[in-house]
Amino acid sequence: MDLPHVSAALGVIHPICVARGRNAEVWDETGQRYIDFIGGIGVLNLGHSHPVVVEAVKTQVETLMHSAFNAVPHRGYLAVVEALNQFVPVSYPLSCMLTNSGAEATENALKVARGVTGRQAVIAFDDAFHGRTLAALNLNGKVKPYKSGLGALPGPVYHLPFPSRDSGVTAEQSLAALERLFEVEIPADEVACMIVEPIQGEGGFRLLCPQFAKAMRDICNQHNIVLIYDEIQSGFGRSGKRFGFTHLGVEPDLLLMGKSIASGLPLAALAGRAELMDALPKGALGGTYSGNAVACAAALAVMNVMQKDTLENWGSRQESLIVEAYEAWQSSGRFPMLGAITGVGSMRGIVFNDTQNATGAEHLTALLNAGRKAGILLMPSGRKRNILRLLPPLTAEPEILKEGLSLIEQALETLSA
């Protein structure tokens, strides 16, 4: 696909141009239909053009398109932060700011943590992804392609192994690495914050070990370290629950949200304990477009649709269909490149292993191409780009979801062992 005037540094997975979408289906400019298991990389948990969201956006556009909240507040922003206070399952009242993107939310979380604690150091995790802006980049848990050739990045940042049943790293191993870090690299009382994804996205849909999550919470409490959970990809229903941290039984001090918060419109949020969020001087937080009125209208519609029972029903249905299909593929013995299934609930990945003829990454690249030809759009993840991440809309009709899984099987048949 020819991309004139587009920077070659922008990577494109599928060389097609999408023209329209409806729930879990999209059509390109030639009229070719695809089932979308990418969902804008986790942005479209309610699917393309959800009617409730579309109606809310249309109404808002006719009323007020934008007001810079820092200059003149508007009701949509106020309504969204109030709704977040009810929607986010924590035991304390939230203080919030809205941003344009997840990376911007990450940057502001670092500002809050450093400003409140008077410390600079940050602890992040291997295989993490927190954004492409400079400070967020340094938090990412792999070099290529994000950090290559950029030299020194804002820090200091230290990385720990990510403990998960899906990574093969135990809680004990990560805690030992943290103890070594405090003894050898930097004392705990110089660490401003620890940032982690309860379920890694780019890292391959891996659930943080609950045992480690509880120990991490205790360590942060002991040393007055701010605990930040990045739920930009795992939040807003992706795992079948409102947020991934529910699977861990631990609350963060600061929470990053984005992607499906506004069903495709640019909006994200940073929320947390008021004593942290309210500590910086007036004017320290904000942005010209942050909390755009139209995006806020979409976010209110999203939270209205994403009720607890609805999410759990969608999530359990999707989980059962995905796991059933995977187990059938695995048990058939026809696809020796298939490895473990990762993740939790409806947030699932499938590892592709190396075989005699190809690496796991090569197998997955071939699957993506074969899938597109068959009529399904898929997305890679993982440090080696060998983990298929499945991101169909939670609202996908069962028959469409089953068709998509059948197309994946059809594409798998084309791979050589």
Image: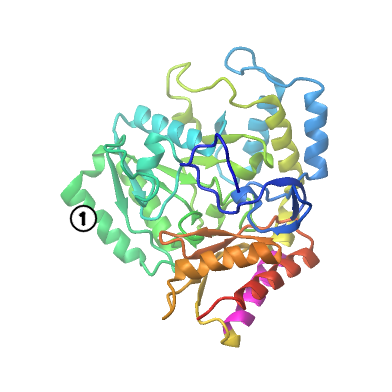
Task: Kindly identify the residue that appears in the image at 57 percent across and 20 percent down.
Answer: 288
Whether residue 377 sits left or right of residue 175 in the image: it is right
In the rendered structure, which amino acid carries the disc numbered 1? Arg
Q: Which residue is mark 1?
A: 180
Q: Is residue 350 visible?
A: no
Looking at the rendered structure, the secondary structure element under dot 1 is helix
Range of the magenta residues?
316-330
Is residue 405 one of those drawn in magenta? Answer: no
Q: Is residue 178 above or below residue 228?
A: below
Q: Residue furthest top?
A: 71
Task: Kindly identify the residue that appears in the image at 39 percent across and 48 percent down.
Answer: 145
Task: Please name whichever residue, 43 or 223, is drawn nearer the observer in this view of the structure.
Answer: 43
Task: Kindly identify the residue that appears in the image at 42 percent across and 64 percent down.
Answer: 164
Q: How is the image coloured?
A: rainbow
Task: Kindly identify the residue that appears in the image at 52 percent across and 38 percent down.
Answer: 102
Is residue 319 one of those drawn in magenta? Answer: yes
Pinpoint residue 132: horizontal percent, then vertical percent. Answer: 44, 40
Q: Residues within 10 Å of mark 1 (few under 14, many from 20)?
A: few
Q: Quadrant of residue 414?
A: bottom right
